[in-house]
Amino acid sequence: MHVNLPQKLYYSIGEVSKAFNVNASLIRFWEKEFQELNPKKNNKGTRRYSSIDIEKLQIIHHLVKEKGYTLDGARDQLKTLNKNFEVIKKLEKIKTSLLNIKNEL
């Protein structure tokens, strides 16, 4: 699922819920259910979602809403995906470095 959000540092829960086409209460519920999802909060308790939080929400939304996983199943998949995601990010950095070296030759 592609989420249509403007490029900025933090997003409000209203912006996020609109982008995912779900109620804000569902996003707050997912925060309680998935420890990986932990947006920053200001002194008033207003949530601010980073781009990393949005990526995690995309995965959770995909697993629960599109693939039909239970919350337990989605938690298990998310743990596996997080491990794989870290490896993929490292490999992408290496690829970018190698392409830069190639272009400099």
Image (cartoon, rainbow, N blue to C red):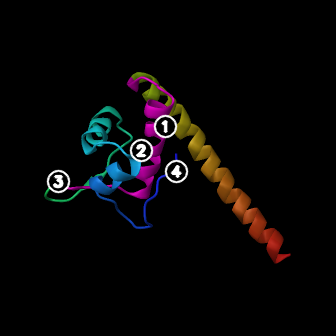
Q: Is residue 65 magenta?
A: yes
Distance Cα–Cα, label 4 vs label 2: 11 Å
Distance Cα–Cα, label 2 vs label 3: 19 Å
Q: Which residue is mark 4?
A: 2
Where residue 45 is drawn, which disc sits there?
Answer: 3
Circles 4 and 2 in contact, beta carbons < 8 Å: no
Secondary structure beneath dot 3 equals loop
Number of numbered discs visible in the structure rendering: 4
Q: Earlier in the sequence, mark 1 or mark 2?
A: 2
Residue 46 image-quadrant placement:
bottom left
Q: Which residue is mark 1?
A: 62
Q: Residue at x 43, y 60 (%)?
A: 5
- Vertical relation: 59 (above or below) 51: above
Q: Earlier in the sequence, mark 4 or mark 1?
A: 4
Q: Earlier in the sequence, mark 3 or mark 1?
A: 3
Circles 1 and 2 in contact, beta carbons < 8 Å: no
Distance Cα–Cα, label 4 vs label 3: 28 Å
In the rendered image, residue 84, in percent from the top left (x then y), is placed at 60, 39
The stretch in magenta equals 46-71
State left or right for residue 105 relative to residue 6.
Answer: right
Q: Badge 4, how many Cα within 10 Å: few under 14, some, many 20+?
A: few
